[in-house]
Every structure is written in C-alpha cells, then in structure tokens.
Image (spheres, grey):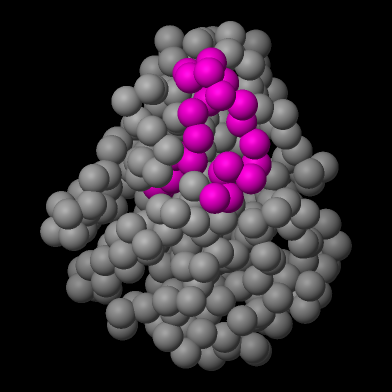
Amino acid sequence: MTGSLKTMVSYVKGRANVSPATAVVLGSGLGHMAENVEGGVKVPYGDIPGYPQPTVEGHSGELILGNLRGEKVVMASGRFHLYEGWDLETVTLPIKLFHELGVKNLILTNSAGSVQVQNGPGTLMAITAHLDFTYQESSDTPLIVNEDRYHSSGLLHIAGESAERNRIDLKEGVYAWALGPSYETPAEIDLIRELGGHAVGMSTVPEIRAAGELGMNILTISCLTNYAAGVVEAPITHEEVITSAAEAGERFGKLLTSIIEDLGGTE
C-alpha cells in the first residue's frame, strides 16, 4: 500500500461534502446497490492517492457518498481480499478510512456459499457470529466468535425488524472465513458444518475485526449465492455467484434501504 491514510481522507472529503454516519461495503455482484444513494458523489478508487484497486469481477472499485432515506452514507463498491495478494493492512484500509470520515455504523455485505442444504441460493442471512477457518494465526480448532463488539445485537435487532416489516425472509447464522481463491473441498465444508458454520466466504472477517477494534457498530449480511462444495452435486463457479447475487438484488436492496432508514430514526 502506498500513500497515507490522512491524504486519502483529505481527498475524499474534498470530493464530497458529506460526513457519513453509516458505511456499507458491497460484496460480489451487489454494486448496483449504490444506485439507491441520492445525490451520490462517486469517487473511483483509482483517483484516491495511494488507494489500491480491486481485481475481482463484480467489484467495480469506487466510493459513493450521499444520502439514503435521510441517512448520510458512504458505500464501497468493491473490497480487497488476501487471496489477491494484499496484506491485512490493505484489506482493512477501507474500514480505517470510514472511521476517519466519522462513520459509526458499518454494514458489511458479501456473497457466500451455503453450508446447509435448507438455505438455498438467494437466501439472505444476518451473521450473528464468525469463525476463522484460515488457520493463519493458529492450528487449533477454530472457535465461534459472537461478541457484541463484532456483531452488534442492536443492529441485528433492527435488521430483523426491517426484514419482518418488509416480509423478507432473513435467516441467521455463523460465517466461516476461508482464504481462497479456490473454493473449499467437500471435506472442509463438512468440518465447517461440524464447527457450527452456516455460510462460508473469502472476506469480511478482517473487516469485522478492524471495525470492532475501532468501536464501530457492525452488522454483516450474506447473500448465499451457491451451495458450498459437497452440499449438493453441482459445480461452483464465480459466474453463478454473480448471477445469484444479482437475482437476489431487489430483496437485498429493499432490506438494506429499510435498515439504513431505521438507523437514521435512532439518532
């Protein structure tokens, strides 16, 4: 990573006169959500001094600052992954940028694989806990982490109420973080299921950790875009992930908009 955080923050503030209270990170295939931002100012990652650019399909690489149902927001269309060759400092850079912009509430979204056959493609899942399946820090059996500083009970409650009011089926579950870029084997998926996981993906947990350390309120919602390996007899492709995310986009967008509107009402 090149460039200083201070320089990045100064540049973004100069492009958009918005002090966002809520940030949303948009996962694979969910970049269209930025279209809901009113008066949105787009800041391409490539224009921000020293800011990296994503390389994965479905991650366009821009910040959008504006208003959504009266709430000042910043959306990140595109994230960074360890499997792209970035280090943890770079992967979590957007979270630090959000914090410096004054963000209090962080909504993380991602596309993930379903570990449970009853949660088919298109399922929306509020993440109540996570586990680190990368084995980078330890070879010990991963433990489920459900602390409130990483998974805000208050935001989960708002998400549940928003889903019910809009008649959107919102499941709850545990997200398992794997390194990628290859999809997990059936044996790995069996172990994740045994450990208590419901969804598996290659991102988000570093962002959760960084935001938790900075004192943000964190909500994570996964769009389950495919069955993980071995759950059903079908191959997994990134194209399937993008397609499924797009098909679920209307429901996901309606839910996120409602949540953000409710957040504005709590201030």
Residue positioned 43% across, 45% down in the render = 223
Residue positioned 49% across, 41% down in the render = 225
Instruction: Indicate the quadrant where residue 224 lies.
Output: top left
User: Does residue 251 belong to the magenta stretch?
Assistant: no
Instruction: Indicate the quadrant where residue 42 lies.
Output: bottom right
Instruction: Indicate the quadrant where residue 130 lies.
Output: top left
Horizontal and vertical percent position of residue 98: 55, 66
Q: Quadrant of the N terminus?
A: bottom right
Horizontal and vertical percent position of residue 36: 42, 76
Residue 122 is left or right of residue 4, and the answer is: left
Furthest residue in direction front, as rendered: 234
User: Does residue 234 belong to the magenta stretch?
Assistant: yes
Looking at the image, which is closer to me, 167 or 12?
Answer: 167
Is residue 107 something one can see in this rendering?
A: no
Is residue 172 something one can see in this rendering?
A: yes
Horizontal and vertical percent position of residue 78: 63, 59
Q: Quadrant of the C terminus?
A: bottom left
Residue 216 is left or right of residue 77, and the answer is: left
Number of marks = 0
Furthest residue in direction right, as rendered: 2
Horizontal and vertical percent position of residue 180: 70, 31
- Residue range in magenta is 220-243
Q: Is residue 228 above or below residue 151?
A: above
Residue 114 is left or right of residue 99, and the answer is: left
Q: Is residue 108 above or below residue 49?
A: above
Residue 75 is left or right of residue 60, and the answer is: left
Q: Is residue 108 above or below residue 205?
A: below
Looking at the image, which is closer to me, 82 or 59?
Answer: 59
Residue positioned 48% across, 76% down in the render = 35
Furthest residue in direction left, as rendered: 165
